[in-house]
Image (spheres, coloured by chain):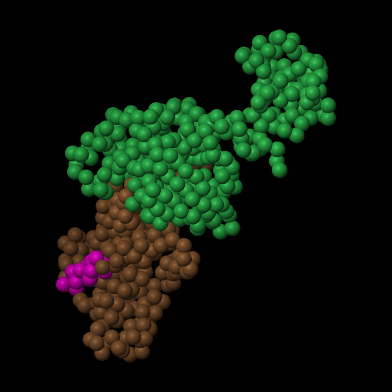
Amino acid sequence: MSIVVDSVSKRFGEFVALDDVSLEVRDGSLTALLGPSGGGKSTLLRVIAGLEQPDAGRVRIAGEDATFTPPQRRNVGFVFQHYAAFKHMTVRKNVAFGLTIRKRPKNETDARVDELLGLVHLEGFADRYPSQLSGGQRQRMALARALAVQPRVLLLDEPFGALDATVRKELRAWLRRLHDEVHVTTVFVTHDQEEAMEVAEQIVVLNHGLVEQIGSPRELYERPANEFVMRFIGPVTPLGERWLRPHDVDILLEPAEGATEAMIDRVTHLGFEVRVELSLGDGDTTWVQTTRGRAEQLELQEGQIVWLRPAHEAAMAPEPA
Amino acid sequence: MRSRLALRFAALGYLGLLLGIPVALVFVNAFQDGIGAAWDAVTTPEAQHAFYLTMVMVAVAVPLNTIFGVLCALAIVRQRFRGRALLNALVDLPFAVSPVVVGLALLLVYGRRDGWIGEWLAEQGVQIIFSTPGMILATMFVSLPFVVREVIPVLREIGTEQEQAAATLGAGRLQTFLRVTLPAIRWGVAYGVVLTTARALGEFGAVSVVSGKLSGRTETAPLFVENRYQRFDETGAYAASVVLALLALATLLAMNLIKPKEAGA
């Protein structure tokens, strides 16, 4: 089901968590809310879930105005960063919770729980308690619990934030595959741009309670709306007044129009990638990413004078007005 | 090594001198004339009535203070309202005020002649002071803080995420409380109940002031103990003390027995 957020604002005392935020999430899509901590992304997710009430604006889920619908009646699945597992219940009871509340017949509930435990690869764990599971398993259990009631939308608040790096990577790929299987409209919050780029179809960049940009991962990387997005999504390197992607800088051996003179301080070979550190005339330093083939062709070495120029169609934020 | 032994010795010695030896001597003195004499002393009609009355105190004060305690803890931890800090401080009042003062305060409110509403209540045929209702009120007053104080830290620790998760899964407030919050705080509640029970069993001062100490009518077990002692019936006093101590011990044991060996958090 689609989600429409229309001019939502929310304050906590003096702190502005959301400032006139609008966005649209297409039915069946996978969207990331990305931004630094305190940027408002979790608050926005909680407003969509009904766990927070906006001060102004509207939230529509599947076309219905849900702004003041209590969370119990929104039929959303919510997954918390720290799992929010019901510690006194077994995995089976946790997953069955929503169905038990809805007083579904026992055999139907059991069948559905078994199906979900299969989906999240926790078949053998039904009778364990959450304390007997690893972090990754707990989060998969929480996901199964949220999916059990066939929610209209699935909301995940930093779902992998409390897990270690290896498990994170695994669960990311797994969430992507799960979404392809289940097709439920999904919104997840993350402060990790790599996670957002890898998993999401659409990314909403939030900073200081404002939407900086909404677009596909590629759009954000190649056509950032402003310097903040440029710097937040992917690596940057300074060249004059502008920020460029380090692989979007051409190294020339001759002066050319629009090129800046620089001296190579260091050439580091990182396998396929070669990292060139340089000093600019005014004492600033920068670095450029190039390939091994290109570096060999130019015979780059320390002390050499070269000229740097933004590559043709380099990703750049528009000049600030 | 030596300092660790010394620490253990100091802790055990302190407890032994303050608690162990005196309580042990109570047991010894109770049975100084034999088990038969002790048994006879605690099965007289007065003694039986005293224990019955103490059980009534427990049966009324414990459930009421448990319900109030859980609700009060929920209000203090989960809600933001004016007077929350005041409520939090007031709950501790029974810890701070001497039980005798509690008894006198109840006289000021319910006393028949000069009490604030005592006269009016007497006209309606309701007697609070020198009867069971007043003694129950006194017991409730002094045993009020235990459940609140045990439940508040547990509520803080479990946080609100489990409750929010239950809400997004469709559970209403009451369902969330019964299925998620209450099971999560149950050991805090249980421990509070044990302490409340122990206090209600043993309360002397406040109950003594409002009871009138009518033997066989308004005499609880602790008052019975004092009464026997004043009348030089040492066997009676110590034997009844032993029964009281055993009742308190049984409460503690009961909690340890019902507490399952489930994996911790």
> Where residue B133 appears, x then y in whole percent?
27, 76
A65 shown above or below B231: above
Image side of residue A90 versus residue A176, left or right: left
Q: Nearer the viewer, residue A42 or B107?
A: A42
Image position of A109 (left or right of A242): left
The stretch of residues the image draws in magenta is: B45-59
* Viewer can see residue B68: yes
**Along the line of sight, the residue nearer the viewer: A151 or A89:** A151
Residue found at x 41% / y 76%: B101
The image quadrant of residue A131 is top left
Identify the residue at image location x=36%, y=77%. Answer: B103
- Determine which quarter of the picture holds residue A234: top right
Residue A230 in percent (x, y) is at 63, 34
- Left or right: residue A157 versus residue B22 is right
Secondary structure character of the magenta stretch overall: helix
Quadrant of the image occupied by residue B173: bottom left
Q: Colour of chain B?
A: brown
Q: Is residue A29 above or below residue B43?
A: above
- Chain with green colouring: A
Residue B262 visible in the displayed image: no
Residue appearing at x 44%, y 51% in the figure: A59
Which quadrant does the C terminus of chain B fall into? Answer: top left
Seen at 22% across and 48% down, the residue is: A103
Q: Position of residue A42 (x, y in %)?
A: 49, 45
Q: Is residue B2 magenta?
A: no
A203 sits left or right of B21 in the view? right
